[in-house]
Amino acid sequence: MSAPPLGRVAIIGGGVEAWMTAAGLARATGGQAAIRVVETGPVMTGALSTLPSLRSFHTLLGLDEAALMAATLATYRLGSRFSGWTPGASFCDAFGEIGASLEGVGFHHYWSRLRLAGDATPLDDYSLAAVIARLGRFAGPDPDPRSPLSTLTYGLHLDAGLYVDVLRRLALQGGVAASAGEVAEVVRDGQSGHIAAVALADGERVEAELFVDCTGPAALLMGDEPFEDWSTLLPADRAVRIAAPVLSDAPPLTEIEATAEGWRWRIPLRDRLDGGLTYRAELTSDAAAVKAAWAGLPAEGASEPRFMTIRNGRRARAMVGNCVAIGGAAGRVEAVDGADVHLIQSGVTRLIALFPRPGGAPVAAEEYNRLGGETFERVRDMAILHYRRAGRRDGAIWDLGRDAPVPDKLAYRIAQFESRGRVVMYDEESFLEPSWIAAFIGHGVLPGRYDPLADRMPLERARMTLDRMRQIFRQTAERAPTHAAALARVAP
């Protein structure tokens, strides 16, 4: 039997990365490629905190959001609330715009002008998403551009195992074949170095024109491709995951709290609160990490803790020959900003856009690797910013993070914002400008100057304009349904 026009694709691995790849490729190739998943390892469990970009990917897959949310015990996510990074302070990195541009000048310049004039209003008060979320409410975007809600966007909190089930069903319906197996050997062509086949423990030989490595950090198919270790830039190397009874009044936010031991996360799902602690093993014992992860939660209904090793960094190249690494096989950045699923998704969407035909030119691989490297580094830089500007002095992990080297592009970005409020944006950004502004100001990186064009508006008029904006956002938020009511409307 002849091979299909786009060849055979063998996806080796499991979890979100394998099934997101399978579902995405099945949809994009429309039967022009023969796709097979060989599942290895256990099914991923826990909760996922996702960025708004994932909803666009779901649209590409043809997924109905209400049905997806019901199937995955999902809740809404309007952003993240950071607390404890500077003791006694908190801020939201909320999705959507902060304020509104006035007379062509970015809003944060007017906020900076009033701050330098003595106004102490928190930046969060001018983020509609943050105001709504803090009240425990939820509203989606309004198609009417005149509405304050038109600037909103949102992500989701999903049960990882149930999400894999949805993606698997979708992929199988799209013609993907699947089986379980264990990799015994990766057989390479002696001349090109390309993968000729993957030999399984049961003796089967899996052959394909394209192999996708979804085997996690082990990267079983990537061979000796160098790994860029970022452990000197990001100090955490271990995490513990727990689950607690659901909080009925949980806001549509991922909670990210810094403690002496590391940073703690809390993700609300319909049936439970998923949480844990990310820390450094040589500084914090597993027992101390579990205690810190459970702090403030009821002891009843406690789950058994599950530990994970974190190795921050990435492969120098994610696409090598006829093999491409997706997810943990390509790299990892600790998920302080909830970008771990986004890194998987971006790898899949790049693969779709640059899908290599059998025997095709290597320029597609070069572009895939360039874009992937930029994406990983921009996510890494945001994580470094949190550590670099954390105000804690009660844990050695914070000393490591504060004293770690700062990559040149991040150093330039910090210097530009600290000097005059300029937000530098590079290629392949995962976080939009409002997220960088929220992170900078939330961590105390305050501009020493603002755009002089903001002075065109008289100071008192600027004060009144911002005050009116804040009132409108508060009133709009108070009219929004509670988070629980919003969930009941889409997935009872």
Image (cartoon, rainbow, N blue to C red):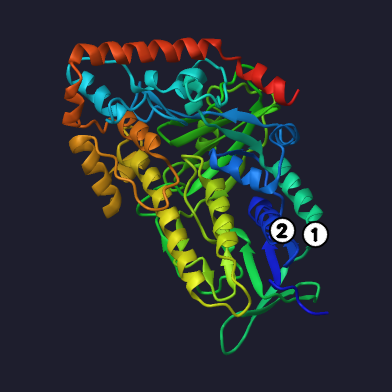
Q: Nearer the viewer, residue 250 or 1?
A: 1
Residue occupying image coordinates x 53% and y 78%? 361
- Looking at marks 2 and 1 on the same chain, the residue that comes earlier in the sequence is marked by 2
Res 302 seen here:
yes
Q: Which residue is mark 2?
A: 26
Q: Secondary structure at mark 1?
A: loop
Residue type beneath disc 1 = Gly
Mark 1 crowdedness (10 Å alpha carbons): few <14, some 14-19, many ≥20: some
Tell me the crowding category of disc 2: few under 14, some 14 to 19, or many 20 or more residues within 10 angstroms, Cα based: many
Residue 268 shows up from this direction: no
* Frontmost residue, 52 versus 255: 52
Q: Residue 468: horizontal and vertical position, in percent?
A: 35, 11
Q: Quadrant of the N terminus?
A: bottom right
- Left or right position of 226 against 178: left
- Measuring from the top left, give residue 316's x and y in whole percent: 44, 67
Give the CA separation, mark 2 to mark 1. Answer: 7 Å
The quadrant of the picture occupied by the C terminus is top right
| The quadrant where residue 86 appears | top left
Three-letter amino acid code at the position of disc 2: Ala
The quadrant where residue 89 appears: top left
Instruction: Identify the residue at horizontal 18%, vertical 23% (top origin).
Output: 456
Q: Which residue is mark 1?
A: 175
Residue at figure coordinates x 50%, y 14% from the top left: 477
The residue furthest bottom is 191
Callouts 2 and 1 close, C-beta under 8 Å: yes
